[in-house]
Image (cartoon, rainbow, N blue to C red):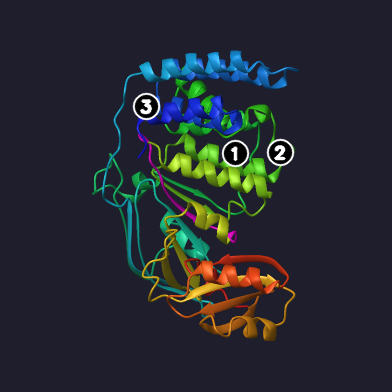
Amino acid sequence: MQTTSGRLHEVKSYFDNGDTHVGYRRLLDAAIETQDMSVFQSTLDFSDWYDQFQQSAGHDHTSLNQEVESLLTKIAAAPTGETVTTTEPVVRISNLRKKYQSGSFSLTDIDLELFPTQIIGLVGENGNGKTTLLRLLYGELRPDQGTIDFRLHGLPATSGFYDIKTRLGFIPQRPEPWYGSLMENLQFTASHYGFKGRENFLWTEMVCARMGLRPFRTYSWNRISSGFKMRFELARTIIKKPQVLLLDEPLANLDVLAQQVILEDLRFLAHSERMPIGIILSSQQLYEVEKVSEQVVFLKQGKPKYQSTSSTRVNSEQQPLVFELETTASREELQEMFATAGLQNISYNGGVYLIYFDPGVSASEVISQLGASKLPVRYFRDISASSRRFFNA
C-alpha cells in the first residue's frame, strides 16, 4: 500500500507533468484520506478555484502549481489517522450453492476469499450466475448450502447481518430512480449513516467532487446521463464508507473513456489507507476488468473457474500459449504458417481465431512469425492468462 508521503509526491508529479485531470482526482483522494474537516473545507475552496481555473481562457500553470502545493502542505500537516492493515479476508465464501425452484439453473461450489484493497472480476455469459452471486453476498438471496463469512474491521464477529450490511455497498445494473436533487439525495444518505450538520455538508461535497458530480449537484434523475447516474450511485455508496463493494455491470452504459476512468477510480478507492475496500465487479468488458482485478472468476452454467490476472504467465512451460487473432486470412493459411511453430489447434470463436500452441512456445515467436508472414492482421492478443479463453461461441 502506498504511503502518505508517496501519495502526495504522486499528486505533485501529475500536476508537474500536466496530467491535471488525474492529478485533481488523486489530490481529492489524498484529502479524503485525512478525514479532517478543515482539510475538507480547504479542498472544497480549492475545487471552487479549480473550476474557475478550468474555465479561464489562458491557463496559468504557475498559479495552479502554487495552489496545489499549498493544499498538499495542509494535507501533509493533518493528523494521521488509523491505517487499516489486515491479512484477513473481509469475506470468505465456502461451498456456496443456490438453486432456483423454477428452471434448472444452479450456482454451485463457489469458494472465494476477498481481501481489503482487492478487486475480483466476475465474468461470464449472461444467465450464468453473476448477479445471483452478488445478491447472495448482499443478503437479497439465501444460499441453499455453504457459508458466507464476513470479517469487517471494527465490527465484532458476533454481529448480526443488519450491522454487517451497513458496511456493504451493492450497486445493481439498473438502479432505482430517485427524487429531488442529486445533492439532496447524497445528504440524506449521509444523515442516515450518522453525518450531521457541517460534517454532513463537507463529506457529501467531498464525495460529490471526487466522483466528478459538482456540475450536477442541483440536477434531478431525469437530467443526468446514465454514466453520471452510475457515478451518483458510487458516490451514494462511498458516503457510507463501505468495506465491501459489490458492482453488477457498472460499465454497461458507459462510453470507452468513462469505463477507463471508472475502473481507475475503483482501483484508487480500493487502495485507501484508512478506508480500504474489497470490490467484486461483474462485467462483460472482460479485458478492461482484467486490467484492474487481482483475480477473475469465470462462471459457466453456475460453475466457477478461477484465475490470477498476473502479467507473468504461471508455469509457462506447462501451460499452452493461446492467441486471439483477427485476420482476413483463411484457416488454411494460418495452419500452413504455424505448422512448424508448435501449433495445436485453431478455432473460430466470436468473429476471431483462437490459436493454441504447445507449452513452451513464446508470444514473441508467434509475433515474429506473424510479422514475417505479411498476412493481413487487424488485431491480436495473448490470452493465455485471460478468461477470454473460457468463452465459447
Q: Is residue 237 above or below residue 377?
A: above
| Secondary element type, mark 2 | loop
Q: Is residue 206 left or right of residue 175?
A: left
- Residue 343: x %, y % from top left: 54, 83
Provide the residue span drawn in magenta: 273-285
Task: Give the mark nearer the N terminus: 1 vs 2.
Answer: 2
Report the residue marked by disc 3: 5
Rendered residue at 45%/19% (across/down) = 72
Rendered residue at 46%/76% (across/down) = 320
Identify the disc placed on residue 224: 2
Separation of disc 3 and disc 1 at Cα?
A: 30 Å
Tell me the crowding category of disc 2: few under 14, some 14 to 19, or many 20 or more residues within 10 angstroms, Cα based. Answer: some
Judging depth in this view, the residue of 4 and 38 nearest the camera is 4
| Secondary element type, mark 1 | helix
Q: Is residue 326 left or right of residue 317?
A: right
Separation of disc 1 and disc 2 at Cα?
A: 10 Å
Q: Is residue 318 above or below residue 363?
A: below
The image quadrant where one finds the N terminus is top left
The amino acid type, in three-letter code, at marker 2 is Ile
Task: Give the mark nearer the N terminus: 3 vs 2.
Answer: 3
| Secondary element type, mark 3 | helix
- Of circles 3 and 2, the one toward us is 3
The amino acid type, in three-letter code, at marker 3 is Ser
Judging depth in this view, the residue of 217 and 326 nearest the camera is 326
Mark 1 near mark 2, Cβ–Cβ under 8 Å? yes
Tell me the crowding category of disc 1: few under 14, some 14 to 19, or many 20 or more residues within 10 angstroms, Cα based. Answer: many
- Residue 389: x %, y % from top left: 53, 73
